[in-house]
Image: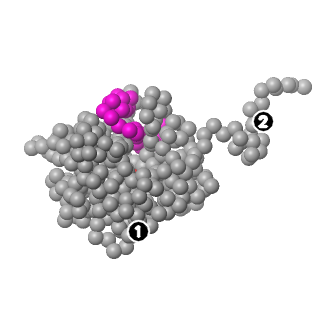
Amino acid sequence: MTTIARRPRRLRTTPAIRRLVAETRVHPAQLVLPVFVADGLSEPNPISSLPGVVQHTLDSVRAEANAAVSAGIGGIVLFGVPEPDDKDATGSAAYAADGILNRAIAALRAEVGDDLPIIADTCLDEFTDHGHCGVLDADGRVDNDATVELYVRQAVSQAEAGAHFVSPSGMMDGQVAAIRAGLDVAGHSDVGILAYAVKYASAFYGPFREAVGSSLVGDRRTYQQDSANRREGRLEAALDELEGADLLMVKPASHYLDVLADVAAWSRIPVAAYQVSGEYAMIAAAAERGWIDRQATLTEAVTCIVRAGADIVLTYAALELAGWLK
Ligand code: PBG
C-alpha cells in the first residue's frame, strides 16, 4: 500500500472546503464600471462591438449610477462622446464647462453625491478631430508639454464639475505632477488622481474606439508603451507614484498579469487593472456563440486579475459580476 502524506486534493473535496481555502476573493466593492455618455442622444445607443454596453444619455447614465450604488460596486468611470461637430484640433469640448463629460459628471454627482466615487477620464482623444490623445505640433507629432497643459485645464474643469477622481489616460510624461499641482492651486486638493500609469499600445482597445466614435487614423505607439516591455512598467508606475498619484492602473489586464504582479509587489498605493474593451468583447462574443460560459469565464478572468495583485478592477461586467458574487 502506498501512503501519500501530502494530498492537495483533500482541500478540493467539496465546494464549501474550496470556498474556505480560496486565496482570492473578489468583492463588488473593488469593481469599477466604465460608462460612455454621448452628446445629442435621445435614447441609449448599443455599441455593436461591446455586447451589453451602450452609449448613455444624461438620463440613462443617472439610472446606471443608481444601479451601481444598489449593486455595491466601488465606483464609476465616465467617458464623454461629443457630437462630431464639436471635435477640434485641441479637443476644446474636453475642458469646456458645458462639454458632455463635464455635464455628465455634474449630473452624476447631483444624483449620487458621495455614495459612489465618480472617476472622470482625463484625456483628449474623444474630443480631437484627429483622434490623438494630445495636441499635434507643426510636424504632426503629439506635443507632450502643450498636451499636459490642456490635461491640467481638463482636470480642473472635472474637479469643478464634481469628480472625486480625475484619471489621466494619455501617457504624456509629467502629466500626474502637473495635474496634481494644477488641482491644488485651484483649491481641489481633495480630488484624487487615478493614474493610467502603465498603459500599453494595445489592439485590445478596438471596441472602445467604436464606443467613443474615435477619429484616430494610425496608432498611439509614440506615447503608449510597447507590449514587449516589462521593466518599463516599473519605471512608469514609479514615476506616477512619486508624481503624486493616489491610485495606479495597469492596462490592459489579462495579457499583462506579469506587469500587474510587478507593480502590485512594489507599489505602496492601491493598484487597479483595466479589463479593456477587447478583453470583454472576446468573452462576450464567444459566449454569444455558445463556445464558452459567460458567467464562468468573466468570473475566472476577474479572479485571476485580482490574484495577480489588482486591488481594484475596471470591467464592463462590473454590475453583472456584483450580482453573481452575492
Ligand atoms: C484613451 C483611452 C482608451 C481606453 C481608455 N482610455 C483608448 C486608447 O488608449 O486608445 C481604452 C479602454 C478600453 O479599450 O476599454 N483615453
In the drawing, does residue 303 fall left or right of residue 22? left
Check the image and name the residue furthest to the bottom: 42
In the structure shown, which secondary structural element does the residue marked by tag 1 occupy? Answer: helix
In the drawing, does residue 216 fall left or right of residue 261? left
Kind of residue indicated by mark 2: Arg
Question: Residue shown at 47%/63% (left/top)?
Answer: 66
250 falls in the magenta region: yes
Residue 121 image position (x, y, % from top left):
33, 51
Q: Which of the pair 80/224 is nearer the observer?
A: 80
Residue 321 image position (x, y, % from top left):
55, 54
Q: Which stretch did the figure color magenta?
A: 232-259
Q: Earlier in the sequence, mark 2 or mark 1?
A: 2
Check the image and name the residue furthest to the front: 187
Residue 3 image position (x, y, % from top left):
85, 25
Picture quarter with the N terminus? top right
Question: Residue shown at 70%/44% (left/top)?
Answer: 19
Rendered image: mark on residue 161: none
Check the image and name the residue furthest to the left: 138
Picture quarter with the C terminus? bottom right
Rendered image: mark on residue 60: 1
Question: Residue shown at 42%/49% (left/top)?
Answer: 276
In the structure shown, which secondary structural element does the residue marked by tag 2 occupy? Answer: helix
Question: Residue shown at 77%/45% (left/top)?
Answer: 14
